[in-house]
Image (cartoon, rainbow, N blue to C red):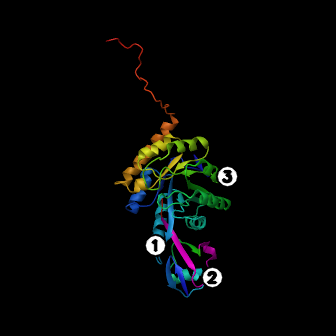
Amino acid sequence: MKITVNGDECEISSYTLSGLLEELGYTTGRIATAVDGLFVPAGLRGDQCLGEGMRVEILSPMQGG
Amino acid sequence: MRFYGTELAGGLMLGTAQYPSPESLAEAVRAARADVVTVSLRRESAGGRAGEGFWSLTRDLGVPVLPNTAGCHTVREAVTTAHMAREVFETDWIKLEVIGDSDTLQPDVFGLTEAARILCEEGFRVFPYTTEDLVVAERLLSVGCEVLMPWGAPIGSGKGLNNPFGLRMMRAHFPDVPLVIDAGIGVPSHAARAMEMGYDAVLINTAVAKAGNPVTMARAFRLAVDAGRLARDAVPMEERDMASPSTPVLGKACLV
């Protein structure tokens, strides 16, 4: 299945957001997630289904003004 | 002055972007004796540790963090970013930016007030990056904001206080609302002027981070903020258009 992760198209086999994070190696670190522009809390990543063409954003703390 | 129940007495908030190194950032925060540091969220690469490293650094600073929604141009983007920031940074404080113009980075005050309404209803403590427009300010307060952060000048421009009349009006109009100059300050004298006007704090980033010596500049800003606040407390003299001799005229010799 093709989806877009942080702006890059990729082929994945997972059908949930938590599965995607594990598949792509986001197993440690402090991140926040959104799917198709909507925030998905950490506790709901296992329930968040993914489908063809969905857009996933994975963000982490960064310097800011 | 209390910001959402938290005493931030020092009057200086510091951005964390654009420093030459993490070490210089940490040293600048200490030199400025910053009350708050602003932070952001950006994309993390798979297996990346950049976010974790920065998170660790901010924790070690021992200063409250104020996440921002920098770069958001729509209400939806800003609200989603605020949700993500609350989870990552474990705070309900949010420096709300909804940008309306890419050249000036001027806030979209219509989107700003709508995003502020949504986030305040959800329990966020919103620090809105706004203009000095009094009607917009009233609207932000009416939807639940308890702090206002007008720009001094466009973000990163270093031009100082572009509209001192408008900023003075804002201070006079909202005597009990915590007010912070959020953008455009370039040198410590700008910060001193803001504090002399009665502003409660200034938020500085580029002026410190891009200085030749960020740590020394951070200290200069601390001194300026303290000086400006002291001057305000001391009640400055009134300006006048005509000269007034400071040396007494009475008793002056007649030597002509």
Where residue B123 sits, quadrant-wise, is bottom right
Q: Which residue is mark 2?
A: A49
Q: CA distance from mark 2 to mark 3?
A: 39 Å
Q: Is residue B20 left or right of residue A8?
A: left
> In this view of the protein, which residue sits in the foreground, B6 or B69?
B69
Task: Evaluate whether label 2 is on the same chain as label 3.
Answer: no
Badge 1: residue crowd in 10 Å (few <14, some 14–19, many ≥20): some
Q: What secondary structure is found at the residue carrying circle 2? A: loop
Q: Which residue is mark 1?
A: B49
Query: Which amino acid, by three-letter code, is at mark 1?
Result: Arg
Residue sitting at x 46%, y 30%: B241
Pinpoint residue B113: horizontal percent, then vertical percent: 62, 57
Query: Which amino acid, by three-letter code, is at mark 3?
Result: Ser
The chain that hosts pointer 3 is B
**Number of numbered labels in the structure image:** 3
Query: Which amino acid, by three-letter code, is at mark 2?
Result: Cys
> In this view of the protein, which residue sits in the foreground, B243 or A1?
B243
Residue B175 showing in the rendered view: no
Q: CA distance from mark 1 to mark 2?
A: 26 Å
Magenta segment includes A58: yes
Up/down of B20 relative to B173, above or below = below
Q: Which residue is mark 3?
A: B142
Q: Which residues are magenta?
A: A37-62
- Quadrant showing the N terminus of chain A: bottom right
Closest to the camera, between mark 1 and mark 3, is: 3
